[in-house]
Amino acid sequence: MLDKKRTTIARLSEAYKVKRTVSRGNINELELTLPLFVTKHLNMRRVKNEHIDMVKERFLIRFEHGEETEYYVVYKKNKVMDDSDYVTISCYGLGYQLSNQSVKDYNAISYSLSQIGNDLLQNTGWRLGYVDAQFDLKYRSFEFSGSILAGMNQIAETFTALIIWDTVNRTINFYDPELYGLNKGFKTKMGKLMKSVQQELNLDEMCTRLKLFGKDGMSIQAVNPTGSNYIEDFSYFMYPFEQDVQGNVIRHSYYMEDDLCIALNRYKKLVQSNTPTFSSPLLSSLLFSSLLFSSRSA
């Protein structure tokens, strides 16, 4: 246990039921239990645990596991009096401190992630660490009022980034979630570390035709090769329909007749083959519209 200056004031060697919850992209949590009474080894007397009163809200806990070190801030103490008197200590990762600092009416237009992050972290004691290069090549508008912690989460959401907290150095890192981590080639299967697998199919969430609409009724007819305001996909209901290279049906759909599956495949190939023919006039049309708008604005 440490005070606010990170000076060690006690070692909680008597702690038990230590549980750390690691949350991807969010603040980690730590919970531990301290006995209300401990036994002195010299005279085997039970005395009140002096650490109970020393642990105070907002004090820090240093958690060490192997070569890993992480700092937590105490946010709750809960004393339980029963057959085995004890106190549970609940902690959040050190980044939780940023929930007590706030910013009001922050507004940025066309800023990168680093620009926004550095602005929000001014005078907080925290700073940006690693930021994936792609996030500083993107520029976003950003409006925010609230705690700095909520602001960091909103930055991650705006840029689709993964937050990794470094509580030792008080830095906040933003990674590409698709690239973060190391593939160690781990594989599992039923009977090998895996006890059960559950797959749920919810027909209420299934969609074969999706209509797209924007502001003022804007849709996609002008850029859709079919000229329609929707996109569709029947692959789920066609599965496992399959044809060989000669067009002979070798596997049948569970839901659809062979003739319908054949017709849908032909239609899909027709649309794909005509997409390049459609794209060239579309590009010319968009370019002409852009030039026309520019000339009118001049």
Image (cartoon, rainbow, N blue to C red):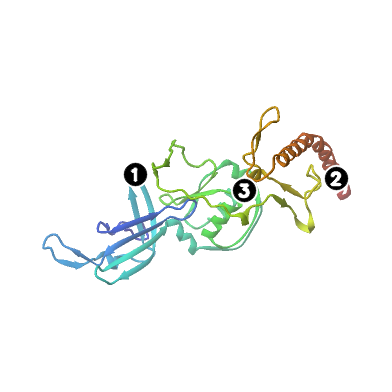
Front-lying residue, 200 or 215 = 200
**Numbered disc 1: secondary structure:** loop
Residue situated furthest bottom in the rendering = 81
Front-lying residue, 186 or 59 = 186
Front-lying residue, 179 or 278 = 278
Q: What residue type is labelled 3?
A: Ser
User: Which residue is painted at 85% across and 43% down in the image?
Assistant: 291
Q: Which amino acid does label 1 sit on?
A: Glu
Front-lying residue, 72 or 83 = 83
Q: What residue type is labelled 2?
A: Ser
Kindly report the distance in space between the C-alpha atoms of the residues bearing marks 1 and 2: 61 Å
As drawn, the label of residue 112 is 3
User: Which residue is painted at 72% across and 37% down in the image?
Assistant: 262
First in sequence: mark 1 vs mark 2: 1
Residue 120 appears in the rendering = no
Q: As displayed, is residue 176 above or below residue 18?
A: above
**At which x and y percent is residue 215?**
76, 57
**At which x and y percent is residue 98?**
48, 60
Q: Mark 1 points at which residue?
A: 67
